[in-house]
């Protein structure tokens, strides 16, 4: 990453858009602490994010690109296990699970083993898990990779509904423009640099912006 700077608004979707190798996943790993930062800083709601402030991560939900559910367990079992890691048990865990499943409309698959679910169904369970502790921010690293067109469209609808129904801020790393809507915030990244910040606009305008950045910096 080189001279990258961006501000993410609360209660909105911010798309981090860029070609493969642009630095999206690297930035995500730096924010989450999976990679050690050599310089620069991140702050969440005015508080610096670093190893000295681990409590800040209680306000963030992460969904990584690589699947991380236990394939042998049911969706419900995966969510109950995650709830336990957050310190929720019994009725409290059940209420949290019920709430996130209502948001993501995934009750119908909860009692099925993860290995039997479609890619889109697995992603909804992963997002539900990331929301169990009621974070103020949700960070998604290429969540639609490997999904078919219909599953991608449903995932996009779920995320936009979440952002509209709550004050949840969403950082969505992607390289697929048609997942985004005109009012989403947009950061286009190439070679580790912030090359554009603003609203997505129409698909036609978005594609023009994206191609211009890729042609100049890709």
Image (spheres, grey):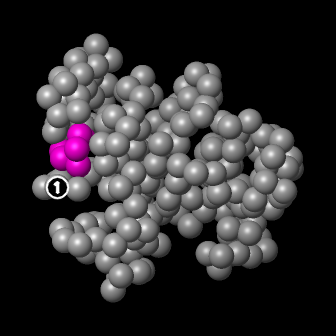
Residue at image coords 61%, 31%:
147
Q: Is residue 192 magenta?
A: yes
- Residue 57 pos. (x, y %): 43, 72
Residue at image coords 83%, 58%:
73
Where on the picture, by quarter, is residue 188?
top left
Residue farthest to the top?
Answer: 204
Q: Is residue 130 visible?
A: yes
Q: Main secondary structure of the magenta part?
A: strand
Against 142, residue 130 (above or below) is below
Residue at image coords 53%, 49%:
65
Q: Is residue 117 magenta?
A: no
Q: Which residue is mark 1?
A: 2
Tell me the quadrant of the picture where the N terminus can be found. Answer: bottom left
Where on the picture, by quarter, is residue 121?
top right
- Residue 218 pos. (x, y %): 23, 33
Pick whichever, 129 or 67, lies toward us. 67
Pick whichever, 100 or 7, lies toward us. 7
How many residues crowd around disc 1 within 10 Å: few (fewer than 14), some, or many (20 or more)? Answer: few
Against 205, residue 169 (above or below) is below
Q: Is residue 16 visible?
A: no
- Determine whether, in the image, residue 158 is placed left or right of residue 194: right
Residue at image coords 22%, 44%:
191
**Which residue range is magenta in the image?**
189-194
Pick whichever, 138 or 96, lies toward us. 138
């Amino acid at each position: 990453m080189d001279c990258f700077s961006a501000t993410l608004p609360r209660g909105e979707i911010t798309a981090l858009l860029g070609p493969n190798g642009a630095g999206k996943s690297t930035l995500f790993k730096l924010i989450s602490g999976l990679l050690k930062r050599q310089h620069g800083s991140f702050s969440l709601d005015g508080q610096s994010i670093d190893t000295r402030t681990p409590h800040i991560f209680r306000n963030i939900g992460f969904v990584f690109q690589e699947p991380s559910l236990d394939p042998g367990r049911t969706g419900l079992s995966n969510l109950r296990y995650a709830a336990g890691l957050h310190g929720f048990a019994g009725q409290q865990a059940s209420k949290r699970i019920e709430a996130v499943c209502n948001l993501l409309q995934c009750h119908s698959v909860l009692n099925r083993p993860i290995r039997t679910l479609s890619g889109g169904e697995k992603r909804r369970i992963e997002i539900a898990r990331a929301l169990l502790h009621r974070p103020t921010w949700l960070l998604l690293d290429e969540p639609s990779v490997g999904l078919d067109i219909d599953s991608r469209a449903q995932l996009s609808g779920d995320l936009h509904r979440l952002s509209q129904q709550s004050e949840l801020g969403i950082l969505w790393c992607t390289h697929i423009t048609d997942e985004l809507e005109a009012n989403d915030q947009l950061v286009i990244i190439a070679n580790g640099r912030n090359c554009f910040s603003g609203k997505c606009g129409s698909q036609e305008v978005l594609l023009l912006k994206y191609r211009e950045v890729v042609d100049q910096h890709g």
